[in-house]
Image: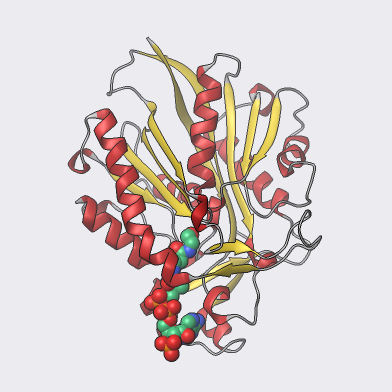
Amino acid sequence: MKIRSVILGAGCYLPERVLTNTDLAKMVDTTDEWIVQRTGIHERHIAAPGQVTSELGLRAAQAALADANVDPQTIDLIILATSTPDNTFPATAVSIQAGLGITGGAAFDLQAVCSGFVYGLATADGLLQTGNFKRALLIGAETFSRILDWTDRTTCVLFGDGAGAVVLEAQEQPGERTDRGVLITRLRSDGRHKTKLYVDGGPSSTQTVGHLRMEGKEVFRHAVAMITDVVEDAFRATGYTAKDLDWFVPHQANKRIIDGSAHKLGVDANKVIITVDKHGNTSAASIPLALCAGLADGRIKRGDLVMLEAMGGGFTWGAALVRM
Ligand code: UT7
Protein backbone atom coordinates (compact mmCIF):
# COMPACT_ATOMS: atom_id res chain seq x y z
CA MET A 1 0.00 0.00 0.00
CA LYS A 2 1.09 3.56 -0.67
CA ILE A 3 -0.33 6.97 0.13
CA ARG A 4 -1.16 8.81 -3.10
CA SER A 5 -2.27 12.42 -3.51
CA VAL A 6 -5.51 12.17 -5.45
CA ILE A 7 -7.03 15.20 -7.18
CA LEU A 8 -10.61 15.47 -5.90
CA GLY A 9 -11.56 18.59 -7.83
CA ALA A 10 -10.32 21.67 -9.66
CA GLY A 11 -11.43 25.26 -10.05
CA CYS A 12 -10.25 28.43 -11.67
CA TYR A 13 -10.84 32.15 -11.88
CA LEU A 14 -10.04 34.71 -14.55
CA PRO A 15 -10.50 38.45 -14.05
CA GLU A 16 -13.29 39.98 -16.11
CA ARG A 17 -11.26 42.36 -18.24
CA VAL A 18 -9.92 40.93 -21.49
CA LEU A 19 -7.00 42.65 -23.20
CA THR A 20 -6.72 41.70 -26.87
CA ASN A 21 -3.69 41.94 -29.14
CA THR A 22 -5.47 44.77 -30.96
CA ASP A 23 -5.76 46.64 -27.65
CA LEU A 24 -2.01 46.12 -27.09
CA ALA A 25 -1.20 47.42 -30.57
CA LYS A 26 -2.59 50.77 -29.38
CA MET A 27 -0.21 50.77 -26.40
CA VAL A 28 3.12 49.55 -27.88
CA ASP A 29 4.62 49.05 -31.34
CA THR A 30 3.22 45.59 -32.05
CA THR A 31 0.61 43.82 -34.18
CA ASP A 32 -1.93 41.06 -33.67
CA GLU A 33 -0.17 39.17 -36.46
CA TRP A 34 3.28 39.28 -34.77
CA ILE A 35 1.92 38.17 -31.39
CA VAL A 36 -0.17 35.31 -32.82
CA GLN A 37 2.59 34.09 -35.12
CA ARG A 38 5.35 34.17 -32.47
CA THR A 39 3.36 33.05 -29.41
CA GLY A 40 -0.14 31.80 -30.30
CA ILE A 41 -1.63 34.35 -27.87
CA HIS A 42 -4.79 36.20 -28.94
CA GLU A 43 -5.91 37.68 -25.65
CA ARG A 44 -5.28 37.65 -21.90
CA HIS A 45 -7.19 38.63 -18.74
CA ILE A 46 -6.10 41.57 -16.57
CA ALA A 47 -7.03 42.03 -12.89
CA ALA A 48 -9.12 45.10 -12.05
CA PRO A 49 -7.45 47.93 -10.14
CA GLY A 50 -7.17 46.83 -6.52
CA GLN A 51 -7.85 43.19 -7.35
CA VAL A 52 -5.01 41.32 -5.65
CA THR A 53 -3.56 37.85 -6.15
CA SER A 54 -5.24 36.52 -2.99
CA GLU A 55 -8.66 37.47 -4.39
CA LEU A 56 -7.99 35.55 -7.60
CA GLY A 57 -6.61 32.62 -5.62
CA LEU A 58 -9.51 32.61 -3.20
CA ARG A 59 -12.06 32.45 -6.01
CA ALA A 60 -10.20 29.60 -7.69
CA ALA A 61 -9.93 27.78 -4.34
CA GLN A 62 -13.66 28.18 -3.69
CA ALA A 63 -14.42 26.79 -7.15
CA ALA A 64 -12.09 23.82 -6.57
CA LEU A 65 -13.66 23.07 -3.17
CA ALA A 66 -17.15 23.19 -4.73
CA ASP A 67 -16.02 20.94 -7.60
CA ALA A 68 -14.54 18.46 -5.10
CA ASN A 69 -17.60 18.78 -2.84
CA VAL A 70 -15.29 19.25 0.11
CA ASP A 71 -15.88 21.26 3.29
CA PRO A 72 -13.11 23.92 3.59
CA GLN A 73 -12.75 22.97 7.27
CA THR A 74 -11.31 19.60 6.23
CA ILE A 75 -8.39 21.31 4.46
CA ASP A 76 -5.23 21.14 6.59
CA LEU A 77 -2.66 22.34 4.05
CA ILE A 78 -2.73 25.32 1.67
CA ILE A 79 0.10 25.93 -0.77
CA LEU A 80 -0.02 28.96 -3.02
CA ALA A 81 2.40 29.04 -5.93
CA THR A 82 2.93 32.66 -6.92
CA SER A 83 5.58 35.20 -7.91
CA THR A 84 3.18 38.10 -7.45
CA PRO A 85 2.19 37.99 -3.76
CA ASP A 86 -0.10 40.67 -2.31
CA ASN A 87 2.73 41.81 -0.01
CA THR A 88 6.33 40.85 0.67
CA PHE A 89 4.94 39.10 3.72
CA PRO A 90 2.92 37.49 5.21
CA ALA A 91 2.39 34.73 2.69
CA THR A 92 -0.56 35.41 0.42
CA ALA A 93 -1.68 31.85 1.22
CA VAL A 94 -2.74 32.97 4.71
CA SER A 95 -5.08 35.58 3.19
CA ILE A 96 -6.69 32.82 1.16
CA GLN A 97 -6.84 30.65 4.27
CA ALA A 98 -8.60 33.46 6.17
CA GLY A 99 -10.91 34.09 3.21
CA LEU A 100 -11.98 30.45 3.38
CA GLY A 101 -12.59 30.72 7.14
CA ILE A 102 -9.93 28.12 7.92
CA THR A 103 -7.98 28.60 11.16
CA GLY A 104 -6.16 25.27 11.44
CA GLY A 105 -3.46 23.51 9.47
CA ALA A 106 -0.64 25.16 7.54
CA ALA A 107 -0.57 27.72 4.73
CA PHE A 108 2.44 29.05 2.86
CA ASP A 109 3.60 30.47 -0.47
CA LEU A 110 5.96 28.75 -2.84
CA GLN A 111 8.10 30.62 -5.36
CA ALA A 112 9.31 28.83 -8.46
CA VAL A 113 7.93 31.27 -11.06
CA CYS A 114 6.31 29.44 -13.99
CA SER A 115 7.20 26.03 -12.52
CA GLY A 116 5.41 26.94 -9.28
CA PHE A 117 2.45 24.63 -9.76
CA VAL A 118 4.60 21.58 -10.50
CA TYR A 119 6.87 22.45 -7.56
CA GLY A 120 3.74 22.92 -5.43
CA LEU A 121 2.34 19.56 -6.49
CA ALA A 122 5.60 17.83 -5.57
CA THR A 123 5.63 19.63 -2.20
CA ALA A 124 1.98 18.89 -1.41
CA ASP A 125 2.47 15.26 -2.45
CA GLY A 126 5.51 14.92 -0.20
CA LEU A 127 3.70 16.44 2.78
CA LEU A 128 0.58 14.32 2.24
CA GLN A 129 2.75 11.21 2.08
CA THR A 130 4.19 11.96 5.54
CA GLY A 131 0.75 11.25 6.96
CA ASN A 132 0.76 14.61 8.78
CA PHE A 133 -1.74 16.19 6.38
CA LYS A 134 -4.91 14.73 4.88
CA ARG A 135 -6.33 17.27 2.45
CA ALA A 136 -4.46 20.00 0.59
CA LEU A 137 -5.44 22.97 -1.49
CA LEU A 138 -2.83 23.73 -4.13
CA ILE A 139 -3.34 27.07 -5.84
CA GLY A 140 -1.50 28.87 -8.60
CA ALA A 141 -2.46 32.56 -8.69
CA GLU A 142 -0.78 35.49 -10.40
CA THR A 143 -1.21 39.15 -11.22
CA PHE A 144 1.73 39.48 -13.61
CA SER A 145 0.12 42.64 -15.03
CA ARG A 146 1.47 44.39 -11.89
CA ILE A 147 5.12 43.60 -12.65
CA LEU A 148 5.10 44.15 -16.42
CA ASP A 149 6.81 47.10 -18.03
CA TRP A 150 3.91 48.21 -20.20
CA THR A 151 6.29 50.13 -22.48
CA ASP A 152 8.35 46.99 -23.30
CA ARG A 153 6.75 45.23 -26.26
CA THR A 154 9.06 42.23 -25.91
CA THR A 155 7.47 41.22 -22.58
CA CYS A 156 4.15 42.99 -21.99
CA VAL A 157 2.36 41.12 -24.78
CA LEU A 158 3.16 37.72 -23.29
CA PHE A 159 1.60 37.58 -19.83
CA GLY A 160 -1.83 37.62 -18.19
CA ASP A 161 -3.54 37.31 -14.80
CA GLY A 162 -5.52 34.36 -13.41
CA ALA A 163 -5.74 31.58 -10.87
CA GLY A 164 -6.38 27.86 -10.72
CA ALA A 165 -6.57 25.40 -7.85
CA VAL A 166 -6.88 21.72 -7.06
CA VAL A 167 -7.98 19.84 -3.95
CA LEU A 168 -5.70 16.92 -3.14
CA GLU A 169 -6.48 14.10 -0.71
CA ALA A 170 -4.13 11.52 0.80
CA GLN A 171 -5.58 8.12 -0.16
CA GLU A 172 -4.25 4.62 0.35
CA GLN A 173 -3.66 2.99 -3.04
CA PRO A 174 -2.24 -0.42 -3.98
CA GLY A 175 1.14 1.21 -4.83
CA GLU A 176 1.02 0.28 -8.50
CA ARG A 177 1.43 2.42 -11.57
CA THR A 178 -2.30 2.04 -12.24
CA ASP A 179 -3.02 3.92 -8.96
CA ARG A 180 -4.97 7.18 -8.98
CA GLY A 181 -3.18 10.34 -7.90
CA VAL A 182 0.30 11.76 -8.30
CA LEU A 183 2.46 8.93 -9.66
CA ILE A 184 5.76 10.78 -9.94
CA THR A 185 7.19 14.29 -9.83
CA ARG A 186 10.54 15.48 -11.12
CA LEU A 187 11.95 18.93 -10.26
CA ARG A 188 15.01 20.76 -11.60
CA SER A 189 16.66 24.16 -11.35
CA ASP A 190 19.83 25.81 -12.63
CA GLY A 191 20.64 29.23 -11.17
CA ARG A 192 23.27 29.96 -13.79
CA HIS A 193 20.32 31.17 -15.87
CA LYS A 194 18.86 33.44 -13.19
CA THR A 195 19.27 36.69 -15.15
CA LYS A 196 17.58 35.43 -18.31
CA LEU A 197 14.11 35.84 -16.82
CA TYR A 198 13.88 37.87 -13.64
CA VAL A 199 12.32 40.88 -11.92
CA ASP A 200 14.66 43.86 -11.47
CA GLY A 201 13.50 44.71 -7.97
CA GLY A 202 12.86 43.23 -4.56
CA PRO A 203 12.77 43.96 -0.82
CA SER A 204 16.41 43.14 -0.16
CA SER A 205 17.94 44.59 -3.33
CA THR A 206 16.11 47.74 -4.47
CA GLN A 207 13.27 48.03 -1.94
CA THR A 208 10.96 48.29 -4.95
CA VAL A 209 8.74 45.72 -6.64
CA GLY A 210 10.51 45.96 -10.00
CA HIS A 211 9.58 44.87 -13.51
CA LEU A 212 9.87 41.61 -15.37
CA ARG A 213 12.87 41.39 -17.69
CA MET A 214 13.49 38.57 -20.12
CA GLU A 215 15.91 37.47 -22.79
CA GLY A 216 13.10 35.75 -24.67
CA LYS A 217 15.30 34.09 -27.25
CA GLU A 218 17.53 32.59 -24.54
CA VAL A 219 14.54 31.21 -22.62
CA PHE A 220 13.12 29.83 -25.84
CA ARG A 221 16.45 28.21 -26.74
CA HIS A 222 16.51 26.13 -23.53
CA ALA A 223 12.79 25.49 -23.06
CA VAL A 224 12.08 22.47 -25.28
CA ALA A 225 15.24 20.56 -24.26
CA MET A 226 14.66 21.13 -20.54
CA ILE A 227 10.97 20.23 -20.72
CA THR A 228 11.44 17.07 -22.76
CA ASP A 229 14.35 15.93 -20.58
CA VAL A 230 12.37 16.12 -17.34
CA VAL A 231 9.21 14.62 -18.89
CA GLU A 232 11.24 11.70 -20.28
CA ASP A 233 12.76 11.21 -16.84
CA ALA A 234 9.22 10.96 -15.38
CA PHE A 235 8.30 8.42 -18.07
CA ARG A 236 11.42 6.36 -17.36
CA ALA A 237 10.70 6.32 -13.62
CA THR A 238 7.18 4.97 -14.11
CA GLY A 239 7.58 2.79 -17.19
CA TYR A 240 4.98 4.76 -19.08
CA THR A 241 5.58 6.30 -22.51
CA ALA A 242 4.09 9.21 -24.42
CA LYS A 243 1.73 6.76 -26.15
CA ASP A 244 0.12 5.93 -22.78
CA LEU A 245 -0.81 9.54 -22.05
CA ASP A 246 -4.42 10.60 -22.28
CA TRP A 247 -3.55 14.29 -21.88
CA PHE A 248 -0.54 16.56 -21.91
CA VAL A 249 -1.13 19.70 -19.82
CA PRO A 250 1.89 21.96 -20.31
CA HIS A 251 2.71 25.33 -18.83
CA GLN A 252 1.28 27.84 -21.27
CA ALA A 253 4.06 30.27 -22.23
CA ASN A 254 4.21 30.00 -25.98
CA LYS A 255 2.35 27.79 -28.46
CA ARG A 256 5.62 27.16 -30.33
CA ILE A 257 7.31 25.82 -27.17
CA ILE A 258 4.28 23.60 -26.43
CA ASP A 259 4.13 22.27 -30.01
CA GLY A 260 7.90 21.72 -30.10
CA SER A 261 7.88 19.82 -26.80
CA ALA A 262 4.87 17.66 -27.71
CA HIS A 263 6.39 16.85 -31.08
CA LYS A 264 9.79 15.91 -29.61
CA LEU A 265 8.12 13.73 -26.95
CA GLY A 266 5.87 12.03 -29.51
CA VAL A 267 2.63 13.28 -27.93
CA ASP A 268 -0.29 13.58 -30.37
CA ALA A 269 -1.28 17.22 -30.98
CA ASN A 270 -4.91 16.33 -30.19
CA LYS A 271 -3.90 15.24 -26.67
CA VAL A 272 -2.47 18.65 -25.76
CA ILE A 273 -4.55 21.10 -23.72
CA ILE A 274 -3.99 24.64 -25.02
CA THR A 275 -5.18 27.78 -23.23
CA VAL A 276 -2.30 30.14 -24.05
CA ASP A 277 -4.40 31.61 -26.90
CA LYS A 278 -6.96 32.92 -24.41
CA HIS A 279 -4.93 33.38 -21.20
CA GLY A 280 -1.40 34.30 -22.30
CA ASN A 281 1.30 33.19 -19.87
CA THR A 282 -0.18 33.24 -16.36
CA SER A 283 2.97 31.73 -14.82
CA ALA A 284 2.14 29.46 -11.84
CA ALA A 285 -1.58 29.68 -12.68
CA SER A 286 -1.31 28.37 -16.22
CA ILE A 287 -1.27 24.61 -15.53
CA PRO A 288 -4.26 24.56 -13.14
CA LEU A 289 -6.13 26.89 -15.53
CA ALA A 290 -5.46 24.48 -18.40
CA LEU A 291 -6.32 21.44 -16.25
CA CYS A 292 -9.53 23.13 -15.21
CA ALA A 293 -10.45 23.91 -18.83
CA GLY A 294 -9.88 20.27 -19.83
CA LEU A 295 -11.94 18.96 -16.89
CA ALA A 296 -14.74 21.48 -17.32
CA ASP A 297 -15.42 20.61 -20.96
CA GLY A 298 -15.22 16.86 -20.29
CA ARG A 299 -12.03 16.14 -22.24
CA ILE A 300 -10.11 15.05 -19.11
CA LYS A 301 -11.92 12.26 -17.24
CA ARG A 302 -11.44 10.26 -14.09
CA GLY A 303 -8.81 7.59 -14.65
CA ASP A 304 -7.00 9.53 -17.39
CA LEU A 305 -3.20 9.62 -17.35
CA VAL A 306 -2.05 13.24 -17.48
CA MET A 307 1.45 14.71 -17.77
CA LEU A 308 1.96 18.21 -16.39
CA GLU A 309 5.16 20.15 -17.13
CA ALA A 310 6.60 23.62 -16.78
CA MET A 311 9.76 25.64 -17.27
CA GLY A 312 10.51 29.22 -16.31
CA GLY A 313 12.53 31.77 -14.34
CA GLY A 314 15.56 30.47 -12.44
CA PHE A 315 15.63 28.47 -14.59
CA THR A 316 13.32 26.06 -12.84
CA TRP A 317 11.54 23.21 -14.55
CA GLY A 318 9.66 20.07 -13.70
CA ALA A 319 7.09 17.45 -14.60
CA ALA A 320 4.36 15.51 -12.80
CA LEU A 321 2.55 12.40 -13.96
CA VAL A 322 -0.94 12.12 -12.48
CA ARG A 323 -3.82 9.70 -12.86
CA MET A 324 -7.04 11.65 -12.43
O1 UT7 B 1 7.20 30.88 -18.85
C1 UT7 B 1 8.47 30.81 -19.39
C2 UT7 B 1 8.89 32.15 -19.72
N1 UT7 B 1 8.83 32.67 -21.00
C3 UT7 B 1 8.90 32.06 -22.18
O2 UT7 B 1 8.81 30.88 -22.30
C4 UT7 B 1 9.13 32.93 -23.36
C5 UT7 B 1 10.20 32.35 -24.24
N2 UT7 B 1 10.45 33.15 -25.39
C6 UT7 B 1 9.54 33.38 -26.37
O3 UT7 B 1 8.41 32.95 -26.27
C7 UT7 B 1 9.99 34.12 -27.60
O4 UT7 B 1 11.39 34.27 -27.58
C8 UT7 B 1 9.32 35.50 -27.77
C9 UT7 B 1 7.85 35.33 -28.09
C10 UT7 B 1 9.49 36.30 -26.50
C11 UT7 B 1 9.98 36.26 -28.94
O5 UT7 B 1 9.91 35.49 -30.11
P1 UT7 B 1 11.20 35.35 -31.03
O6 UT7 B 1 10.79 34.58 -32.22
O7 UT7 B 1 12.29 34.78 -30.20
O8 UT7 B 1 11.47 36.86 -31.47
P2 UT7 B 1 12.76 37.75 -31.22
O9 UT7 B 1 12.93 38.03 -29.78
O10 UT7 B 1 13.90 37.14 -31.96
O11 UT7 B 1 12.34 39.06 -31.94
C12 UT7 B 1 12.19 39.12 -33.37
C13 UT7 B 1 11.89 40.53 -33.76
C14 UT7 B 1 12.84 41.56 -33.15
O12 UT7 B 1 13.06 42.55 -34.13
P3 UT7 B 1 14.41 42.56 -35.00
O13 UT7 B 1 15.50 42.69 -33.99
O14 UT7 B 1 14.41 41.25 -35.71
O15 UT7 B 1 14.22 43.75 -35.88
C15 UT7 B 1 12.07 42.14 -32.01
O16 UT7 B 1 12.45 43.47 -31.72
O17 UT7 B 1 10.58 40.90 -33.27
C16 UT7 B 1 10.67 42.13 -32.55
N3 UT7 B 1 9.66 42.13 -31.51
C17 UT7 B 1 8.39 42.49 -31.73
N4 UT7 B 1 7.76 42.93 -32.82
C18 UT7 B 1 6.46 43.20 -32.71
C19 UT7 B 1 9.80 41.74 -30.22
N5 UT7 B 1 8.62 41.87 -29.58
C20 UT7 B 1 7.74 42.33 -30.50
C21 UT7 B 1 6.38 42.65 -30.44
N6 UT7 B 1 5.78 43.06 -31.56
N7 UT7 B 1 5.65 42.51 -29.32
Q: Quadrant of the N terminus?
A: top left
Residue closer to the observer: 6 or 144? 144
Is residue 173 at all visible to an observer of this figure?
yes
At which x and y percent is residue 20? Answer: 53, 77
| Residue 106 occupies quadrant | top right
At which x and y percent is residue 129? Answer: 50, 18
Instruction: State the residue lying farthest toward the top.
Output: 1
Is residue 277 at all visible to an observer of this figure?
no
Residue at horizontal 54 percent and vertical 16 percent from the top: 130
Above or below 224: residue 11: above
Residue at horizontal 65 percent and vertical 47 percent from the top: 57
Q: Is residue 87 left or right of residue 142?
A: right
Residue closer to the observer: 80 or 75? 80
At which x and y percent is residue 149? Answer: 65, 75
Residue at horizontal 29 percent and vertical 18 percent from the top: 176
Q: Quadrant of the C terminus?
A: top left
- In this rendering, the count of numbered labels is 0
Instruction: State the residue lying farthest toward the front.
Output: 192
Above or below 226: residue 256: below
Q: Quadrant of ligand 1?
A: bottom left
Give the colour scheme of this rendering. secondary structure
Residue at horizontal 31 percent and vertical 31 percent from the top: 303
Above or below 238: residue 318: below
Q: Is residue 36 left or right of residue 229?
A: right
Residue closer to the observer: 137 or 298? 137
